[in-house]
Image (cartoon, rainbow, N blue to C red):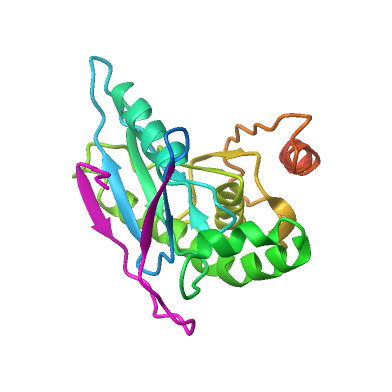
């Protein structure tokens, strides 16, 4: 299944204590496209800015999937291609996901009526996934001139669990790896414990439907309120 970025950048990471399994690529449907599971080697897939209005901005995209898989094509490739075609350098982050022998995608489908198990399992992997996001920001910032981007115009965004990765990374960032702006899209905040607004308080675009079936809207509103109230 071809998923072609213009450049793939492996991210250095500390070896985890969890067992790793073979990464899988599964074509789910025409609408959903390809999902990935058992991601144990983090990577940035870069799409260079194109068109008549190329900017010096970059956006790192974290697809959703509960931290059990990555909805890589629908919430990664399609958006990266759209951003790149509008002059924004786009990077899909293949952050580490929950390891399990066999199909994690199939196993995750059994968790819909076991919400606490899903939360507990996702919390195990979130520290690794968010560290991958912070590493991606730092690597991109240090290589800004190579990719014709401003090191102070690097954004981080994500969908659902990818939104949780975005927020966890933002809350735990430092001066070297802070995102300059963020876009949590219906973030799954049930798995994020630390919620202190960082000192740099990056501009935030927050989106969630009020009738979200997973009831994620309230947490999105809370992020907005926290940002407004933070000094």
Q: Looking at the image, which residue is at 69% across and 33% down? A: 208
**Vertical order, 60 against 125 (above or below):** above
Examine the rendering and report whether any part of residue 176 can be seen.
no
**Vertical order, 50 against 7 (above or below):** above
Q: Looking at the image, which residue is at 56% across and 54% down? A: 165
Pinpoint residue 205: horizontal percent, then vertical percent: 60, 32
Where does the C terminus fall, quadrant-wise? Answer: top right
Is 104 a magenta residue? no
Q: Looking at the image, which residue is at 35% across and 67% down? A: 41
Pinpoint residue 216: horizontal percent, then vertical percent: 75, 42
Please tell me whether the stretch drawn in magenta is mainly helix, strand or loop. loop
Examine the rendering and report whether any part of residue 229 can be seen.
yes
In the figure, is residue 139 to the left or right of 6? right
In the figure, is residue 118 to the left or right of 153? right
Pinpoint residue 98: horizontal percent, then vertical percent: 52, 68
Q: Which residues are magenta?
A: 1-28
How many numbered tags mark residues here? 0
């Amino acid at each position: 299944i071809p998923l072609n970025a213009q450049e793939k950048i492996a991210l250095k990471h500390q070896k985890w204590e969890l067992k790793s399994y073979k990464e899988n690529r599964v074509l789910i449907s025409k609408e959903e496209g390809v999902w990935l599971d058992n991601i144990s080697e983090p990577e940035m897939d870069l799409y260079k800015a194109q068109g008549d209005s190329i900017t010096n901005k970059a956006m790192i995209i974290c697809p959703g999937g509960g931290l059990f898989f990555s909805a890589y094509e629908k919430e990664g490739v399609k958006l990266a291609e759209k951003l790149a075609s509008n002059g924004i350098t786009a990077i899909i982050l293949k952050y580490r996901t929950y390891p399990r022998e066999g199909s994690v995608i199939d196993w995750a489908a059994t968790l819909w009526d076991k919400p606490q198990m899903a939360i507990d399992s996702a919390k195990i992997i979130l520290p690794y996934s968010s560290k991958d996001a912070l590493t991606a920001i730092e690597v991109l910032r240090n290589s800004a001139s190579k990719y014709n981007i401003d090191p102070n115009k690097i954004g981080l965004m994500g969908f659902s669990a990818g939104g949780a990765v975005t927020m966890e990374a933002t809350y735990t960032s430092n001066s070297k790896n802070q995102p300059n702006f963020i876009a949590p899209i219906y973030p799954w905040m049930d798995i994020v414990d630390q919620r202190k607004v960082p000192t740099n308080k990056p501009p935030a675009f927050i989106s969630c439907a009020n009738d979200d079936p997973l009831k994620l809207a309230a947490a999105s509103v809370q992020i907005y309120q926290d940002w407004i109230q933070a000094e």
